[in-house]
Every structure is written in C-alpha cells, then in structure tokens.
Amino acid sequence: MSETENGTRLEVESKPEASGTATQEMKELVHSIKECVIESIERNPYQMLAIAAGVGLIAGILLKRR
C-alpha cells in the first residue's frame, strides 16, 4: 500500500502479526484489571458494595428523568 506524505511517497506494510500482538496485549491488560478489581473487592467488600449502590442510584435517577 502506498501513501503520500508531504509530497513524498511512503510504502506502508501491513503486518498481521502486529495486530495479534496488540490483541494479546489487550487480553493481558484486561486480565490484569480483572485481578485488581477482584483483589480490591476481597479487601474492601463493603466499600465496593457502597460504590456499586451509588452508581446504581445515580443511573436510576438519570434514567428516570427521561
């Protein structure tokens, strides 16, 4: 594939393995976030319950207005 930038022609290669690497990195990131959330819930269950209730209350108020 060719692209033109500032009057010069650049050759751009598409690398399928690059998207696979990005996908793997995203999976690792999601797994890491999941572990952090689970650990946080285990350490502070009542705080997490209060946060979830607060988010639900705010969502309910905002949706009721429509």
Image (cartoon, grey):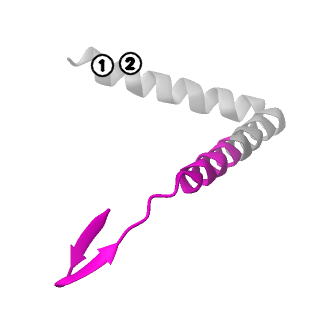
* Direction from residue 52 to residue 43 in the image, left or right: right
Residue drawn at x 40%, y 27% as measured from the top left: 58
Q: Please give the range of residues in magenta.
A: 1-30
Q: Name the side, left or right, on which 26 lies relative to 36.
A: left
Amino acid carrying label 2: it is: Gly
Secondary structure, mark 2, is: helix
The image position of residue 12, as x and y in percent, is 38, 68
Depth check: give the residue in front, 44 or 12.
Answer: 12
In the image, residue 34 lies at what x, y percent?
A: 71, 38
- Other-residue count near label 2 (Cα within 10 Å), few / some / many at <14 / 14–19 / ≥20: few
Q: Amino acid at mark 1?
A: Leu
At 62% from the left and 29% from the top, the residue drawn is 50
State the CA–CA distance, disc 2 to disc 1: 5 Å
Asked if residue 52 is positioned above or below residue 21 in the image, the reply reads above
**Taking 24 as reference, is 11 above or below it?**
below
**Residue 38 sits in quarter:** top right
Q: Nearer the viewer, residue 39 or 46?
A: 39
Is residue 5 found inside the magenta-colored segment of the image? yes
Task: Find disc 2 in the rendering and name its residue.
Answer: 60
Mark 1: few/some/many CA within 10 Å (<14, 14-19, 20+):
few
Element type where label 1 sits in the image? helix
**Residue pictured at 30% horizontal, 19% vertical:** 63
In contact (CB < 8 Å): disc 2 and disc 1: yes
Q: Position of residue 21 (x, y in %)?
A: 63, 53
| Farthest bottom residue in view | 7
Q: Report if residue 60 lies within the magenta region.
A: no
Residue 42 is labelled as none
Residue bearing mark 1: 63
